Amino acid sequence: MAQTIGRETISDLAGQPAPGEILVDLVRLEREYYARKPDMGDPNQRVTFGTSGHRGSPLAGAFTEAHIAAITQATWFAARPSGTENIYKVYAESFVHQSHLDAIVAEARAIVDSALGSSA
């Protein structure tokens, strides 16, 4: 049972040791993270993004080493028009190296220029 105070809900477990039945087996969690391959036929195991990033659990095949590889090896960028100038801004990042980032930015500019029918 939980208690609500104002807009906050406080669990009856607050301040208590966690009961064994709700604890996660960390050894199994790590093993599943590295060993399990997502089933692409199961929509719940596919890499998906929202405003808060990717969520899931290795125990459900929804957050594995394969997911991280897919996310970090892909080329993702954001582009938006400036609110103060007649330009668009490209935002990108790379966890690989600077030349990878440069390639992402160049590709992003080409995609945006093509979409806008302009050349930079």
Image: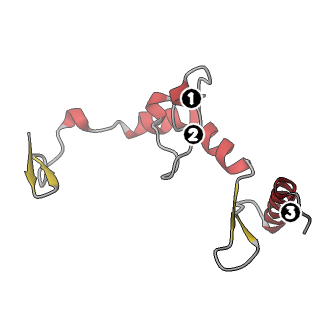
The one of 44 and 29 positioned closer to us in this rendering: 44
Task: Assign the C terminus to one quadrant of the image.
Answer: bottom right
Q: Where is residue 85 in the image (x, y as percent from the top left)?
A: 71, 79
Residue 40 in percent (x, y) is at 62, 24
User: Relative to 42, does residue 70 appear above or below in the rendering?
Assistant: below
Identify the element where label 1 is drawn. loop
- Residue at figure coordinates x 83%, y 66% from the top left: 102
Q: Nearer the viewer, mark 2 or mark 1?
A: 2
Q: In the rendered view, how is the structure colored?
A: secondary structure
Q: Distance of mark 2 from mark 3, alpha carbons? A: 25 Å
Corner quadrant of residue 42: top right
Going from N to C along the chain, the mark reached first, 2 or 1, is: 1
Residue at image point 16% right, 56% down: 7
Residue under circle 1? 36
Gap between marks 3 and 1, in whole Å? 35 Å
- Tell me the tag on residue 48: 2
Report which residue position mark 3 lands on: 106
What x and y, as percent, mark residue 3?
7, 48
Vertical order, 13 against 22 (above or below):
below
